[in-house]
Amino acid sequence: MEAEQKEWGEGTIALHTGYSPVPLDMTRFRSFVPPIIQSSVYPFESVAHGARVLQHLEPGYYYGRMNNPTVDVLQERLAALEGGERALATASGMHGVFALTNHLAKVGDEVVTSHMIYGEAYKLLFQLAPERLGITPRFVENPADLEDWERQITPRTRFVWAETPSNPTMFVTDIAGLSEITRAHNVPLIVDNTLATPCLFRPLELGADIVLLSLTKFVAGNGAVVGGAVIGSEELIEDILARTLGYIGATMSPFDAWVTLMSIETLPMRMARHSRNAERVVAYLAQHPKVTRVNYPGLPDHPQHELAKRQMPDGCGGMMSFVVEGGTDGATTVMESFQMIPIAVTFGTSRTIATHPASHTHWPMTPEEREAAGIYDGLIRLSVGLEEPEDIIADLEQALDKL
């Protein structure tokens, strides 16, 4: 009999959950790796069989917009890694944001969040949701103050949204403390865990109700996949499938799910390496005379350093940001002088990547909002990759010398 997943370590879960090439499991595919089931439709054994499957009286596959065997393996593996009952793979991380917003809130409802979230999620919640969905966002000015979160919760609040660590300033939210508040008000807490991944942080264990992941980033880690995932209770995921996702239709493709599955096998090792490399790069930048600020929770002077040590004892991941002299001109000079580090809008790949948040990812914010969030014109977001740390530092050094 297959060992229960709670007895496995994360490295074993990343390799075996959902499908494992052992005799008791091989009846599903009879293959060493999960195959790509590239089919949009699945035939029934009989009319009665089709009726039972379509009416959800028994499990089964019937239409690619609703379910797929390859995607199912990915979903089972993600749920096990995050410690959730069930996962739902989506076409992108932002589609996961939209699906949750559309599913949990309606016209006249409210949601609570802060500026310490992904730039496009901020735009959806603060611009598109009010204009097109009739949903009102309530703004937490000081996300470090749990009382500020509680003050924004009203009888119309349908969920509270937090990202930790946040992109790009690496703010760390107290999830255990916040979850006590949301539970007291019977409001679900959604946590974007994209930067840490379940290898470094598991929000559900601290009381969060729902986890969102952009699989495009560290989980896939290859820059070749666009995908997202929502992890939560069996009831929530089934409800989203039945009442929302099937009608929106933006599901993850079998091929992208398969590529992500192959990458997840090395996720624990990659996240450990990302963290070690980032620590080396941060130590270098923190002492550089042309760098005025470094954002990384592993630094002792980070405002939430002690909280980060409690929530992420195994490392703070591969994302960081730093501020250089000269504002936008200074950041541009440095970034356009890189010889190995590419400029791109994504993060979380095996290669180190640089982004200018003020003009690339958080431009929908006003200058005042960016300033309040610590997204200064001279801020450079650095997604530290898996290269040799000495090579990353060398490229940073020669670029900073141009200032």
Image (cartoon, rainbow, N blue to C red):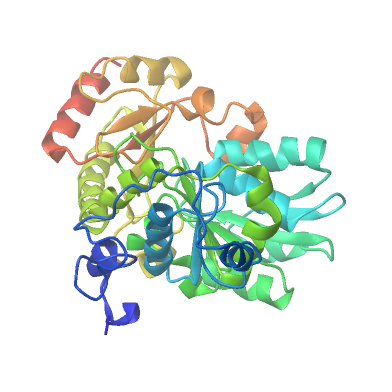
Percent position of residue 291, x then y: 33, 31
Q: How many numbered circles are shown?
A: 0
Q: Is residue 345 above or below residue 271?
A: above
- On screen, residue 88 versus residue 130, left or right, reads left
On the image, the x and y values in percent for residue 288 come to 26, 33
Which residue is most to the right?
108
Name the spot of residue 245 as percent of width and height, x first. 63, 50
For this rendering, which residue is in front, 386 or 372?
386
- Look at the image and tell me in which quarter the N terminus lies: bottom left
Of residues 350 and 126, the one nearer the viewer is: 350
**Residue at the image point whose x is 22% and y is 39% from the top:** 284
Residue 192 visible (yes or no): yes
Taking the spot 21% from the left edge, 18% from the top edge, the residue there is 339
Which residue is at the front of the view, 23 or 378? 23
Residue 305 in sight here: no
Q: Position of residue 168 (x, y in %)?
A: 46, 40
Location of residue 151 (image quadrant): bottom right
Q: Residue at x 32, y 65 (%)?
A: 28
Quadrant where the image shows the C terminus: top left
Q: Residue furthest bottom?
A: 1
Q: Is residue 53 left or right of residue 305?
A: right
Quarter of image, res 132 = top right
Which of the 4 image quarters holds residue 155?
bottom right
Position above or below: 326 against 112: above
